[in-house]
Image: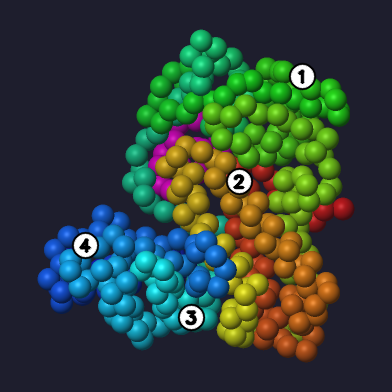
Amino acid sequence: MQARAFTPPAWDIPARLEAHLHNAVVALMADEGITDMPEAITVELPRRDGRGDFTSAVALNLAGGPGLEPPRLAEKIAARLLGNPDLQGVEIAGAGYLNLTLSSSAWAGMLAGLLAEGGDYGRSLRGEGKHIHPGFLPVDSEQPLPADYARCTVVGAALANILDFVGFRTQRSWRINGEGTVTIRLGQPIRLLLTRGQEIETNMSLPDLDAAIGADATRIGMLMHRNVSPVTLDGPLLSDMSHDNPLFNLQYAHARCQGLQRKGALALPAEWNEKAWDGQAFEARDARLILRSLALYPRQIDRAARSGEPQWLARYLLDLANILHAQYYRALTASHLRFIRDDDRLLTGARLALVRGVGTVLKSGLSLLGVSAPEEIR
């Protein structure tokens, strides 16, 4: 097994960490005479706060033999990561987990790469141009899907957008009650709640549902669920301007990003270089929560594509929106956390770059789901 000569782009933090781990493991295997490479070397978010930005169980999956138990292997892998410019620290925890803390320069590189990619952030060529023809089957084979089943159109369009984004060429005429190169099973029925206490089971067409509760509400109402789950479209909730409404939460987060950027443009001088950042801003816990979430966007798109489940992307976007809202509300009572600081332009530049990153990802992800991303909400 050879070390990887190719280093993933700066914006693909998980892939860069996995490449660094791969090369460290290859060096360790050569030094220690280990012959069995782990099937996969991956990183994931730590389950507890304060345990680095990402964690890996690679040492637990490496067969080292006597004297090379996982904690000892983890120590040797960590030693080979010393001096890596992407890493600020490596800690060993528990049975041999490696907790990886990224350097501010790595986070700055990720964010700069995201902003440079813009709407193409997360796009890949994994599909290699292969043709995909989606097919839809019912979960219950004795209850065939209606020929104009609205959920086929909503899920099919979102999935086609996602698959195309990762390099496939997706045919947009679905097979209803028939298998395709990708086959999706959908749960029935759709229940529509127009007013509190008035719930009906419906096979309404998509245009009729859009007219009843709105196109964006219809799509988010369906796409927040697993494909096999029945759906209740809660009209009153999906029209409510509160954070209980996932559609409002998502669209308000995007509008909030645009509003903060407009305020930032007024607060900073016209000749301000928007790429002039204080990298120390990325040391703060709140900033890292946003950065880690942004770094996961390409993988969530890929997860949705591989599983045929757009809900993974929808739920990820909602989590990102919640992180932004939480940071905004914390800053209302803690001035040092504000995105725009009149007394520190470099810090303001870094925080506004984070805001642009969130806005970019939300707009991109909502577009893939077929949902609008308004510039403002009144």
The secondary element bearing badge 3 is classed as: loop
Q: Is residue 169 magenta?
A: yes
Q: Are marks 1 and 3 in contact (CB under 8 Å)?
A: no
Q: What kind of residue is marked 3?
A: Ser
For the residues labelled 4 and 1, the Cα–Cα distance comes to 57 Å
Query: Would you say residue 176 is visible in this rendering?
Result: no
Which residue bears the numbered disc 1? 200
Residue in view at x 20 percent, y 66 percent? 64
For the residues labelled 1 and 3, the Cα–Cα distance comes to 54 Å
Q: Residues within 10 Å of mark 1 (few under 14, many from 20)?
A: few
Q: Nearer the viewer, residue 54 or 132?
A: 54
The secondary element bearing badge 2 is classed as: helix
Q: Are marks 1 and 2 in contact (CB under 8 Å)?
A: no
Q: Quadrant of residue 344?
A: bottom right
Q: Quadrant of residue 272?
A: bottom right
Residue in view at x 74 percent, y 77 percent? 337
For the residues labelled 3 and 4, the Cα–Cα distance comes to 30 Å
